[in-house]
Image: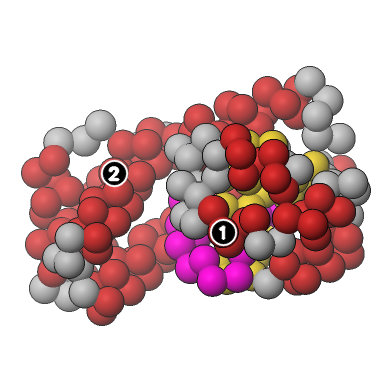
Amino acid sequence: MIPAERLDDLWRSVDSFDEESADVALSGLLWDVPLAEALTGVVVPFLQQMGERWESGRLSVAHEHFASNLLRRRLSALSGVPDGAGAERRPLALLACPSGERHDLVLLCFALLLGQTGWRTLFLGADTPNAAVVSAARAASVDAVVLASTRSTALTANAEALRRLGADHTVYVAGRGADEEVARVVGARLLPADPVAALEVFAGRAAQGAVT
């Protein structure tokens, strides 16, 4: 875990909407650090603080959008690795957040980690209607579907459709809105909220043949 004062430097730049300083601060935190360490030591703590500030009223909509877009750009840069030869033979996972769920940065972190393990990812991101998830999963013949939400109702509202989807694809749920009961209702497997821990569970199930 990085020292709190280094995240404080980043937040000072965010608070003043200083994009250049914020990008320099974030780049310095992520520079020459393995991806898993960058996510657990920098990105996840930053997102946690963002949530705490939002809930306490210390983060405006403008600041939340500014910080989220800053982080999204940096994470996208980390993912810039071409698939290369033989990509079509690697398993494919679809990742999305249900309708109404706009917080997809932790899911993006998970997608980056999956890419390092040899998986291809189809990242649909935030606020994806269930019909779009189903059609994309079938059209792309994905091997697994991962849905993440901060609200349980965003997942359980589509329980019947997700159960049908699970007949053809291995479905996982994750995020603060997912727990054992939600997973049972929608007929899915539960992943931990932390992306690194989720990768361990996902990889373990894949190795056991739960994902084919």
Residue 95 is one of the magenta-drawn residues? yes
Q: Residue at x 34, y 47 (%)?
A: 43
Tell me which corner region of the image, top left, top right, bottom left or bottom right, holds residue 172: top right
Residue nearer the viewer, 199 or 189: 189
Q: Does residue 41 appear to the left or right of 140 in the view shown?
A: left
Q: Residue furthest bottom?
A: 62
* Residue 120 location (% of width, % of height): 72, 48
Q: What residue is shown with label 1?
A: 153
Binning the other alpha carbons within 10 Å of mark 1 as few (below 14), some (14 to 19) or many (20 upward) gives: some
Residue nearer the viewer, 54 or 142: 54
What amino acid is found at the position of numbered circle 2 in the picture? Pro
What amino acid is found at the position of numbered circle 1 in the picture? Thr
* Residue 69 location (% of width, % of height): 37, 70
Mark 2 in CB contact with mark 1 (< 8 angstroms) = no
* Residue 39 location (% of width, % of height): 40, 41
Q: Residue at x 50, y 30 (%)?
A: 197
Q: Does residue 133 appear to the left or right of 177 in the view shown?
A: right
Tell me if residue 26 comes above or below residue 127 in the rendering: above
Q: How many marks?
A: 2
Q: What residue is shown with label 2?
A: 45
Disc 2, SS? helix
Q: Which residues are magenta?
A: 94-107
Residue 86 is one of the magenta-drawn residues? no
Find the distance from the CA under tag 2 to the CA under tag 1: 25 Å
Assign the C terminus to one quadrant of the image: top right
Disc 1, SS? helix
Mark nearer the N terminus (2 vs 1): 2
Q: Residue at x 60, y 35 (%)?
A: 180
Assign the N terminus to one quadrant of the image: top left
Q: Residue at x 62, y 44 (%)?
A: 182
